[in-house]
Image (spheres, rainbow, N blue to C red):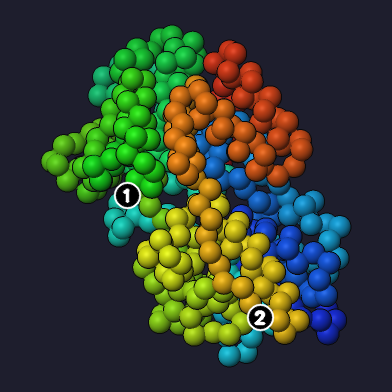
Amino acid sequence: MPKLINTRTRIVDEGKPRIIVIGGGFGGLEVVKGLKGFKAQTVLFDKYNHHCFQPLLYQVATSGLESSSIVFPFRKRFGPQRDFYFRLGEVTQLKPEENTIETSIGSIKYDYLVLANGATTNYYGMKDVEEHAMPMKTIVDSIKLRNLIIRNFETALLTDDPELVNSLMDIVIVGGGPTGVELAGALSELKNHVFPKDYPELEMSQMDIHLVEATPKLLNGMSEAASKKALEYLQHMGVKVHLNCAVKSYDGHETMFNTGERLITRTMIWAAGVKGQPVQGIAASSLGRAARITVDEYNRVKGYENIFAIGDAAIMTGDAGFPNGHPQMAQPAIQQGRLLAANLRRLISNKPLKPFKYKDLGSMATIGRNRAVADLGKVKLKGFPAWMVWMFIHLISIIGFKNKFFVLLSWLMSYFSYDKSNRLIIARPKDGVQ
């Protein structure tokens, strides 16, 4: 019988201030980068050993990109940085009174703690949906979804039951934000340009893509013009858009809506909302709406002096123009991470802190080849210009030259051929990966 390994964090106390960052998303990365060269120990904890570029997860799920092209190892990114430590582990509890965190690999003390552990999928209490729907938050989620979609089509070839074939080919996407809209567009391109070649034995008219949104419009964080244009694009591509419609239940086969309508599908993708995932030990009085951690203008957690929260994990209501907190997107996390790194330097050097003010750089969404919408301040773009801006912004934001190169290469090949070459099932059902 193999001997159990007794793990511990193994980080020596060198007498320097220790800053622990929980989570290596967009915000966490900026904090670590901003502390480079500062005389403090920086410790990054994450349950994965890599950063994932979440805005392009849907392209992995729809066979457009290799999974390796949107992830980047923390140790490769920060390896040369002095006084930096990465530990692969999950934080299970905070003990603020002891300035200690408990993790899956042991406990460790901190002088300053940064909670940048992001958000998790919000199923709004619907346990059946949580059990059967597919989320879209991690690289593992995207691979599982790709496996499921392609396996369902392979299975559809093997049956003469029309209802079963229909349920295997139909896809329901819940949530009309950027993720849902982009997924719907990518799946429509698969239906119209790729699957007919892969599955000539199947009748593609039986494949229906449903996009379900509980409010009266798509892309609620964007302008009315962008919302209407996105709807027009999707409907032109054959996507069936259901507005003012919410899911009541889903058992893995039948979807029930609040309108009384029912749909049969073996694939429901849940992109309808997120919520915070506060670590045990944070006082309930410090939590705001959707379990996000309440912070002041310095991103300091309510009720604590040396604990901070940024990005999707935090809600700051004092920033003018954002009474319900900042949008849970990459830019607020990036900007908060940069300022917090600078403020931690100031705090340790006994200098006054600077308050956070979000600079809205705009929003955008792509709906497929040559189709996108972008709100860039007073500038509103649509069609090919918006699509080019979307590609440029996402490309320069990806970590690593090699990743940028392979993403660009994949996009160019797909543009000229409509081919999505990564149509792979990388596990069998018995392997435990859907």
Locate residue 368, reporting x and y percent. 47, 25
Q: Residue at x 34, y 55 (%)?
A: 123
Secondary structure at numbered mark 2: loop
Quarter of the N terminus within the rendering: bottom right
Q: Which mark is residue 184?
A: none
Question: How many marks can you see?
Answer: 2
Task: Decide which of 345, 310 is in the foreground and name it.
Answer: 345
Residue identified by numbered label 2: 352
Q: Residues within 10 Å of mark 2 (few under 14, many from 20)?
A: few
Residue identified by numbered label 1: 129
Q: Amino acid at mark 1?
A: Val
Secondary structure at numbered mark 1: helix
Q: Residue at x 80, y 64 (%)?
A: 36
Q: Residue at x 32, y 39 (%)?
A: 224
Q: Between disc 2 and disc 1, whose residue precedes?
A: 1
Left or right: where 381 falls relative to 350: left
Left or right: where 176 falls relative to 149: left
Q: Is residue 347 above or below residue 43?
A: below
Which mark is nearer the camera, 2 or 1?
2
Question: In which quarter of the view is residue 275 placed?
Answer: bottom left
* Real-space Cα separation, disc 2 to disc 1, in angstroms: 48 Å
Locate residue 18, reporting x and y percent. 74, 78
Q: Residue furthest front?
A: 378
Q: Residue at x 45, y 55 (%)?
A: 327
Left or right: where 7 falls relative to 314: right
Q: Amino acid at mark 2?
A: Pro
